[in-house]
Image (spheres, rainbow, N blue to C red):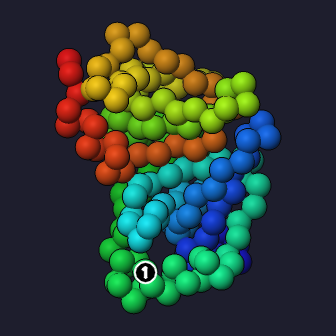
C-alpha cells in the first residue's frame, strides 16, 4: 500500500524530533512534499490534515485498519467524507495562504523540547519560513499577539474540523 491508495483507511505515523504520533485517515491528495488526509476517529470523519512527507515515518494498513475500513464502507461513511475543496500542496506558504483565504483558522501541531504541542487560531501572517497565528485558549480568549511556528517544526496542519469550527463559534473578541 502506498500514498496512491485512496480507497483504504491507513495509519500514518508522523515523527518529529523523536516524538511519534499517528493519524488514521484516507489519502485525498498528494504532492512531492505533502499528503492531505481525511482523518477518521471512532467512525467519525474528523478533519482535513496535511502531513509533510519528510515527517511521515511509515504507513500501515493492518487488520485494525482493514476492519475499520470495512465498517466505514458498510455504514456508507466513506464516499461523502472524501469530498473536499482542493487546495495547493506545493509549499507551506501556499498551503497556509490557501487556508487563510478560505477558512482563516487552523491547528498547527509541532514538537517543542520533546513534547507534542499545538497552536489553534486565526492565521495572521505567512512568512518565508514560518506561520504566525492568533492563538485562542479553551475559554475562547484570543491572544492579542501572535504565536509563530517555523515550518521546519510542523508535524501536521489541521483545518476544516468539527473541533476547530465549534471553538470558532464561541470566541471572545
Q: Residue at x 63, y 41 (%)?
A: 155
Residue 66 vs 17, above or below: the answer is below
Q: Which residue is mark 1?
A: 72
Please state if 16 lies on the left or on the right of 83 as rendered. Answer: right
Q: Can you see residue 7?
A: no
Residue at image location 35% in from the left, 84% down from the top: 75
96 and 106: which one is in front? Answer: 106
Front residue of 16 and 48: 16
Question: Is 153 placed left or right of 104 in the picture?
Answer: right
| Residue 62 x, y percent position in the rendering | 68, 78
Q: Please state which of residues 134 and 65 is positioned toward the viewer in this rendering.
A: 65
Q: Would you identify the image quadrant in which residue 92 lies? A: top right
Whole-percent x, y for residue 19 in the image: 73, 41
Residue sticking out furthest to the top: 144
**Does 134 sit above or below residue 1?**
above
Report the number of numbered marks: 1
Residue 3 in sight in this render: yes
Instruction: Indicate the secondary structure of the residue bearing disc 1.
Output: helix
Quarter of the figure with the N terminus = bottom right
Q: Residue at x 69, y 57 (%)?
A: 13
State the image coordinates of residue 89 (x, y, percent, origin top left): 55, 49
Which residue sits furthest right?
A: 18
21 over 118 or under it: above or below: below
Amino acid at each position: 500500500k502506498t500514498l496512491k491508495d485512496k480507497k483504504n483507511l491507513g495509519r500514518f505515523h508522523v515523527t518529529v524530533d523523536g516524538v511519534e504520533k499517528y493519524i488514521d485517515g484516507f489519502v485525498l491528495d498528494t504532492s512531492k512534499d505533502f499528503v492531505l488526509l481525511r482523518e477518521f476517529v471512532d467512525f467519525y470523519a474528523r478533519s482535513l490534515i496535511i502531513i509533510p512527507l519528510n515527517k511521515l515515518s511509515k504507513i500501515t494498513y493492518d487488520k485494525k485498519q482493514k476492519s475499520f475500513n470495512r465498517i466505514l464502507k458498510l455504514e456508507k461513511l466513506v464516499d461523502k467524507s472524501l469530498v473536499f475543496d482542493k487546495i495547493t500542496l506545493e509549499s507551506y506558504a501556499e498551503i497556509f495562504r490557501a487556508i487563510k483565504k478560505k477558512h482563516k483558522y487552523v491547528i498547527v501541531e509541532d514538537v517543542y523540547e520533546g513534547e507534542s504541542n499545538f497552536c489553534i487560531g486565526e492565521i495572521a501572517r505567512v512568512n518565508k519560513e514560518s506561520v504566525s497565528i492568533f492563538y485562542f485558549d479553551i475559554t475562547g480568549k484570543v491572544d492579542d499577539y501572535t504565536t509563530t511556528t517555523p515550518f521546519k517544526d510542523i508535524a501536521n496542519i489541521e483545518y476544516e474540523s468539527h473541533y476547530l469550527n465549534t471553538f470558532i463559534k464561541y470566541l471572545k473578541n
